[in-house]
Image (spheres, helix red, strand yellow):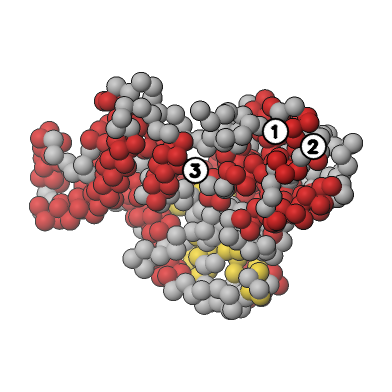
Amino acid sequence: MGKRAALLVGISEYGEGFGPLPGSLKDIQAMVDVLKDPECGAFEVEDLKNCSDTSLESTIEGFFSGKDADSLLLFYFSGHGDLGSGGILNQHLHLCAKNSRKENGRLIESSALSAGFLKRQMDLCRAKQIVVILDCCYSGKIADLLTKGEGDIDFDELKASGRVILASSSAAKVALQEHDGLSLYTQFLIEGMEGAAYPGQGDWIVARNLHEHADRRFEIERKGSYRPRILAEDTGYDLPIVRAPKPDPKLEYRLEVDRIFQELDEEMHLEFNGSIEDGLDRGSLETFRARLGLSPDDALAIEEKIQAPYLVRAKKRQDYAEYFRTAVKDGTTPTSRQRRRLIEICQNLLLGKEDAQRIEKAIAQELDLASPPKQPEIVSSRVDPLELPEKDISDNPQEITTDPKYEKLEKLLQNQKWKEADQETYRLMITIVGRTEEDWLREEDLKTFPCEDLQTLDRLLVKYSKGKWGFSVQKRIWEECGSPKTYNNDWKKFGDRVGWRKNGKWLEYQQLTFDLQKTSFGEFPLGVLGGGMFGLRVGGVSSFSFLAQRLVGFSTRQS
């Protein structure tokens, strides 16, 4: 085995515009304890706390240089992450240091460490095994580090050999920073390293095991759509992080309790109240406890800790079931208005979509409703502009909107200033959801974007482009390409159709031709989806799928 070295960075203090994160130093200490332990991580550990960006840069450079090919390196960061000052069209992950600051709500990029620098040092490093763990906002944006050159991104093809990246959140999500002193993500990783992630065989707990444990813990606690990510090639998934735990009666009992709770939660779902009440389940645990020689008090303490999130989830399921029963009390499926309220309730409860679907299906069968509840969709009182005769979308501007906030956009469209109109479309959308113009649209914004405003924007774009551009045009092409919701060949096909890809490569925003006669159907609007090569290739697919689902009802008249 080669050298195992770890660099752990924690930043709790920041410059103007950033709030303090005292839990970051606790994260670092917890990681030091487990990774430095010769019986666990067996790493040579270097920790760096509350440093400047220049100190962080030089330390990272020194850490990755001079290592042998058979070394295993682990880099961990806990602190603020920021996507920079470029807005939606030019996002890049930055790791913030003690001197990092904002002006007018935007990061001063020279005060933080660009993820590009981290990528450069990883690429120059001779070590063939590298683990990166990022517990910060927008850490999923670290997917940029896997890009090699200017070609097409495909997560199945471009992941570096022997490299794995564990990220606490997606490219568009903030991280949940503190829970009992530690950030949730670090807490779950530590649990896993201490044995909870051990699959029961082998000498090591590998990266895959840790991710699966953290992901399941987030799923159990139902932190909305906050789910960690893992980016790796096949060998990267199996990089050894910590040694397998030694036999421990408390750990063995914990794993057994956890297994039974998982089974009950999956099999009983709405009927599961969060407690182990079945006589055989209880008998299995009791005899296992006695076999391990564990005291009843120790067993009870372990069970109560495992049980806590299941009790919370059971209560949320029951609450949602009661609201759904109210919506269908007359024996019919929910109306569009009721559906919107149910979506909001589901989001407020931090209940997963799959949970809500299973609850609704069970109640629909129980009440013998005329038809099963439909998937949440927003139905508009107007039709898709593509369904209307051309004169209906071009003759009378008053049929589209009288709202003065759209005057600038309409004037730009009338004057055929297409690039400025695309950027004004983004500016309108960002302000409609209550964010500043320097900010960017997040997944939750796109999922709940006001349908009336989205339709107004679409009708203006369709009208002045003579049916060539608009959200509804893009939606139709997206559906024809298989409605891709992840980065795959269907998304590439969609990119080819709308002109975002040429000769197998994604274009930068500035490479697009803002010419109505030369561009493809559906090429615009684009700014809202995240410009730049990475935004179109990877970030854009999730953003567009959320937006397209808001448009699903546009071609359906309200009954």
Name the residue located 43 percent from the left edge and 57 percent from the top edge. 185
Q: Earlier in the sequence, mark 1 or mark 3?
A: 3
- Tell me which numbered mark, 2 or 1, is placed earlier along the sequence: 1
Q: Nearer the viewer, residue 479 or 125?
A: 479
Q: Which residue is mark 3?
A: 238
Closer to us: mark 1 or mark 3?
1
Q: Amino acid at mark 3?
A: Asp
Q: Residue at x 77, y 56 (%)?
A: 408
In the displayed structure image, the side of residue 549 where residue 414 appears, left or right: right
Label 2, label 3: how far apart the Cα atoms are: 62 Å
194 over 161 or under it: above or below: below
Q: Secondary structure at mark 1?
A: helix
The amino acid at mark 2 is: Asp
Instruction: Provide the residue designation for mark 1.
Output: 385
Q: Secondary structure at mark 3?
A: loop
- Residue 98 picture location, percent across and down: 57, 77
Q: Is the residue marked by circle 1 packed among few (<14), some (14-19), or many (20+) residues within 10 Å? A: many
Q: CA distance from mark 2 to mark 1?
A: 13 Å
Seen at 40% across and 33% down, the residue is 334
In this orientation, which residue lies closer to the viewer: 258 or 406? Answer: 406
Q: Name the disc covering residue 395, or none.
A: 2
List x then y, in percent, for residue 204. 41, 47
Q: Residue at x 53, y 31 (%)?
A: 558
